[in-house]
Image (cartoon, rainbow, N blue to C red):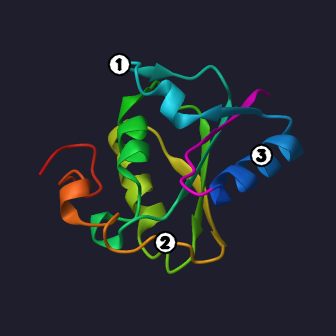
Amino acid sequence: MKTEIYYFSGTGNSLVVAKDIARRTNGKLISIPTMMDNYTIQIDADIIGIVFPTYYEPYGGVPLIVRKFARKLEKINSKYLFAICTYGGGSFKAINCLEEIIESQGGKLTAGFTVNMPNNMAGPSLNNSKKQENVPCLGRKH
């Protein structure tokens, strides 16, 4: 079975986790930002991992780039999808939020994990409502 690990990392914590998972699964490591120019994303792998940090919790904890990535996924109904969310201060809703987006695309998040990391958030200047798209979890805009 072919495995692909997609990751977004702001500080390097999620990258370390993604590299470790890719190594342990013989999976291909792919940066989410490199995929964002694609209008849609069709993945050939049977197993898909998504690794990301928790961001501003009022927006579901899933970084905007990861939400946009997940909304571009197509033909994922038969894939084994799992997510790993790294966090320093909390990851209360992030896995559930990503699960809603995956379901809106016809897939199912089979497993979700959290990994506690050092809290290295830069502060409220990075996590304010003007820097996040006003889209909670679902694949549709509110």
- What is the x, y in percent for residue 105? 37, 36
Q: Position of residue 116 (x, y in %)?
A: 65, 75
Residue at the image position 42 percent from the left and 39 percent from the top: 70
The residue sitting at the bottom extreme is: 89
Quadrant housing residue 128: bottom left
Question: In this view of the protein, which residue sits in the foreground, 99 or 70?
Answer: 70
Does residue 60 appear left or right of residue 80 in this picture?
left
Q: Which residue is mark 1?
A: 39
Magenta-colored stretch includes residue 3 = yes
Q: CA distance from mark 1 to mark 2?
A: 31 Å
Quick one: 114 or 64, which is closer to the camera? 64
Query: 10 Å neighbourhood of mark 1: few (<14), some, or many (≥20)?
Result: few
- Identify the residue at image location x=79%, y=28%: 1
Chain-order first, disc 1 or disc 2: 1
| Residue located 35% across and 36% down the image | 71
For the residue pair 93 and 119, the one nearer the viewer reads as 119
Q: Indicate the amino acid at tag 3.
A: Lys
Q: Is residue 80 left or right of residue 139?
A: right
In the foreground, 84 or 82: 84
| Residue at image mark 2 | 121
Q: Does the image show residue 47?
A: yes
Q: Nearer the viewer, mark 1 or mark 2?
A: 2
Q: How many marks?
A: 3
In the picture, the disc for residue 142 is none
Give the magenta range: 1-11
Residue 22, image quadrant: top right
Residue located beneath label 3 in the image: 19
Whether residue 46 is situated above or below residue 15 in the rendered picture? above
For the residue labelled by badge 2, is the local secondary structure a helix, a strand or a loop? loop
Horizontal and vertical percent position of residue 36? 42, 27
The tag earlier along the polypeptide, 2 or 3, is 3
Name the mark nearer the viewer: 1 or 3. Answer: 3
